Image (cartoon, rainbow, N blue to C red):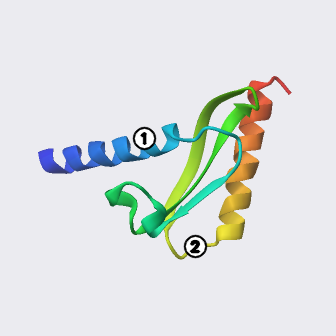
Amino acid sequence: AYLARVKALEEQVVVLKLLNSVRDLQVQVSIGEENEDEELRHASVISAGYGSQSAVLGSLGVVGPTHLDYPGTISSVAAVAHYVSRILAGE
């Protein structure tokens, strides 16, 4: 049980580092070997920042297999990031 908790914590740190690297509102896609972290070399990561052009407040994304519905997932990530940005702007 202890090793499982340590592994889960390590995976969370990997994802947090990844999402912290998002610097703008554009959707970013990394597939397999394009991912810097060893833990994600067999995965795809689709992420986007939210906030405004002058201040990216955070980021969100999807981590999944390398074979996934890229157009649908990219659209979903973009839509949710845009929606969160609008809510934060008070719209």
- Amino acid type, callout 2: Leu
Using residue 11 as the reference point, say whether residue 46 is left or right of it. right
Callout 1–callout 2 Cβ contact below 8 Å: no
Q: Quadrant of residue 41?
A: bottom left
Residue drawn at x 33%, y 49% is: 11
Q: Nearer the viewer, residue 53 or 2?
A: 53
- C-alpha separation, residue under disc 1 versus residue under disc 2: 23 Å
Specify which label sits upstream in the sequence, 1 or 2: 1
| Residue at (59, 44) in percent of width and height | 60
Say above or below: 28 vs 23: below
Q: Residues within 10 Å of mark 2 (few under 14, many from 20)?
A: few
Give the camera-side residue of 44 and 12.
Answer: 44
Q: Please tell me which residue lies in front, 78 or 83.
A: 78
Residue 62: x %, y % from top left: 55, 55
- Which amino acid is tagged 1? Lys
* Residue 1 visible in image: no
| Figure quadrant of residue 13 | top left
Q: Residue furthest right?
A: 91
Per the rendering, the mark at residue 91 is: none
Which residue carries the number 1 mark? 17
Reply above or below: 50 against 10: above
Question: Residue drawn at (65%, 69%), measured in percent from left and top?
Answer: 70
Q: Which residue is mark 2?
A: 68
Q: Secondary structure at mark 1?
A: helix
Q: Residue at x 42, y 41 (%)?
A: 17
x and y, in percent, of residue 53 in the image: 76, 32
Q: Position of residue 50 (x, y in %)?
A: 68, 36
* In this rendering, the label closer to the viewer, 1 or 2: 1
Vertical position of residue 12 compared to residue 29: above or below: above
